[in-house]
Image (spheres, rainbow, N blue to C red):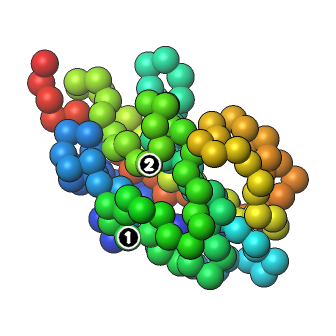
């Protein structure tokens, strides 16, 4: 399975419009080679370089396996896709906004699952990961980096 974006290459800088310093749009994402037997997909975007532990930026799940893209700036999730709570205790995408002068890595990880998850609304990442255990058929990651432009 492969996950890509037309906005940035793997390990390259995330453009400012996809950050908390810009328009805070979710980047366009596309994937291919979803394994046979996949019943749903889940996507997690997190920042392991955050000062107080990993910061969750975006959590979505129950993406139908025949969906191969998420459009730039997607707000209303189609096809019954569910959204979990990010570290701001909100649903939806929250873009990179690291402390000034610090470069952080942002991991977009897509999981192919052999089930459709039955979870409470606004699930947190830990509960999503627990529910996905023993159901992951494949995963793919795309890493972007961002350093704050705000010179405080």
x, y percent for residue 150:
14, 29
Q: Is residue 121 left or right of residue 3?
A: right
Residue 107 visible: no
Q: Is residue 140 left or right of residue 120?
A: left
At x 46%, y 37%, the residue is: 90
In the image, farthest residue toward the left: 151
Label disc, if present, on residue 142 of the rendered structure? none
x, y percent for residue 134:
87, 53
Q: Is residue 30 above or below residue 95?
A: below
At x 12%, y 24%, the residue is: 151
Q: Residue 33 appears in which quarter of the rendering?
A: bottom right
At x 44%, y 26%, the residue is: 50
Foreground residue, 8 or 40?
40
**How far is mark 1 from mark 2, CA to CA?**
13 Å
| Residue pointed to by mark 2 | 92
| Residue pointed to by mark 1 | 71
Q: How many marks?
A: 2
- Residue contact between numbered discs 1 and 2, judged by CB atoms under 8 Å: no
Assess disc 2: are there few (<14), some (14-19) or many (≥20) residues with their C-alpha within 10 Å of its C-alpha: many
Q: Residue 15 appears in which quarter of the rendering?
A: bottom left
x, y percent for residue 70:
44, 69
Of callouts 1 and 2, the N-terminal one: 1
x, y percent for residue 5:
39, 67
Q: Is residue 9 above or below residue 134?
A: below
Secondary structure beneath disc 1? Answer: loop
């Amino acid at each position: 399975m492969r996950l890509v974006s037309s906005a940035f290459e793997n390990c390259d800088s995330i453009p400012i419009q996809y950050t908390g310093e810009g328009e805070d749009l979710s980047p366009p994402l596309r994937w291919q080679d979803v394994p046979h037997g996949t019943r749903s997909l889940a996507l997690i975007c997190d920042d392991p370089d955050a000062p107080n532990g990993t910061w969750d930026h975006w959590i979505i799940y129950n993406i139908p396996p025949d969906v191969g893209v998420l459009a730039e700036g997607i707000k209303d999730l189609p096809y019954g896709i569910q959204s979990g709570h990010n570290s701001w205790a909100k649903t939806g995408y929250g873009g990179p906004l690291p402390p000034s002068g610090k470069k952080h890595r942002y991991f977009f990880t897509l999981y192919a699952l052999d089930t459709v998850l039955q979870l409470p609304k606004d699930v947190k990442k830990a509960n999503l990961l627990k529910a996905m255990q023993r159901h992951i058929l494949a995963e793919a990651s795309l890493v972007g980096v961002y350093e704050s432009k705000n010179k405080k």
